[in-house]
Amino acid sequence: MSSLPEPWLRGPIEGVPPFLAPILYTFQHAREDLAKYTRELTPAQMWARPHGFGSVGFHIRHIAGSTDRLMTYLQGRELSAGQMAALRAEETAGSEGAGELLAELDAAFASAETIVRALDPERLAESRYVGRKRLPTTVVGLLTHIAEHIQRHVGQAISAAKLASI
């Protein structure tokens, strides 16, 4: 792997306001960590549930899906029927290997990056609503949650990967 420092220590991202850069750093850090810790896992190991914990495959699929759903709320929209179906299917074990799952994750992050890059930093305090109950938050609240949610599941995926490879 690379000897580069973590993404947030590589300097500013050209063309991205400083208040929006942390979410893009999060996407890159997740990509790199997940690639590093899954590169030698077989598809069976990707979907193993060591000690009953969530599988690596679940965590990667959930990161991609939750990022997509939260970006929908960030844009002030409601979830589609397809997004709801994808949510229900996240815990179903698949047969995909690391490459396929990481490609799905990269596609979700690429779409999210486009949305983030188009945000006006002057609108970070704007109200947004989440879920059927329309729970209140803000643009910056959603961005913060997306970043911490991704990192939480990356950590769980890494732990599951280490247990699955024992």
Image (cartoon, rainbow, N blue to C red):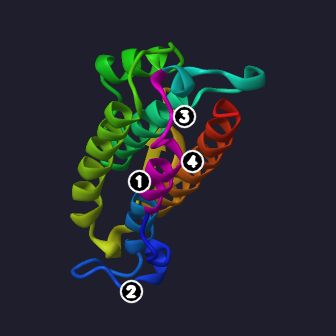
Q: Is residue 149 left or right of residue 66?
A: right
Can residue 125 be spotted in the picture? no
**Position in image of residue 8 (x %, y %):** 47, 77
**Position in image of residue 24 (x %, y %):** 37, 65
Crowdedness near tag 2: few (<14), some (14–19) or many (≥20) residues, C-alpha within 10 Å: few
Depth check: give the residue in front, 156 or 19: 156
Nearer-N-terminus badge (1/4): 1
Q: Is residue 153 left or right of residue 99?
A: right
Give the labeled residue for mark 2.
11
Q: Main secondary structure of the magenta part?
A: helix
- Residue at 35% of width from left, 24% of height from top? 83
Above or below for 166 versus 118: above
**The quadrant where residue 161 appears:** top right
The residue under label 3 is which amino acid type?
His
The answer to whether the residues at label 1 and label 4 have Cβ atoms under 8 Å apart is no
How far apart are the alpha carbons under marks 1 and 2?
18 Å
Above or below for 13 versus 102: below
**The quadrant where residue 98 appears:** top left
Give the labeled residue for mark 4.
154
**Does dot 4 land on a helix, a strand or a loop?**
helix
Please report the bounds of the magenta region as a residue range. 29-43
**Position in image of residue 46 (x %, y %):** 52, 27
- Residue at 50% of width from left, 28% of height from top? 57
How far apart are the alpha carbons under marks 1 and 4?
9 Å
Q: Nearer the viewer, mark 1 or mark 2?
A: 1
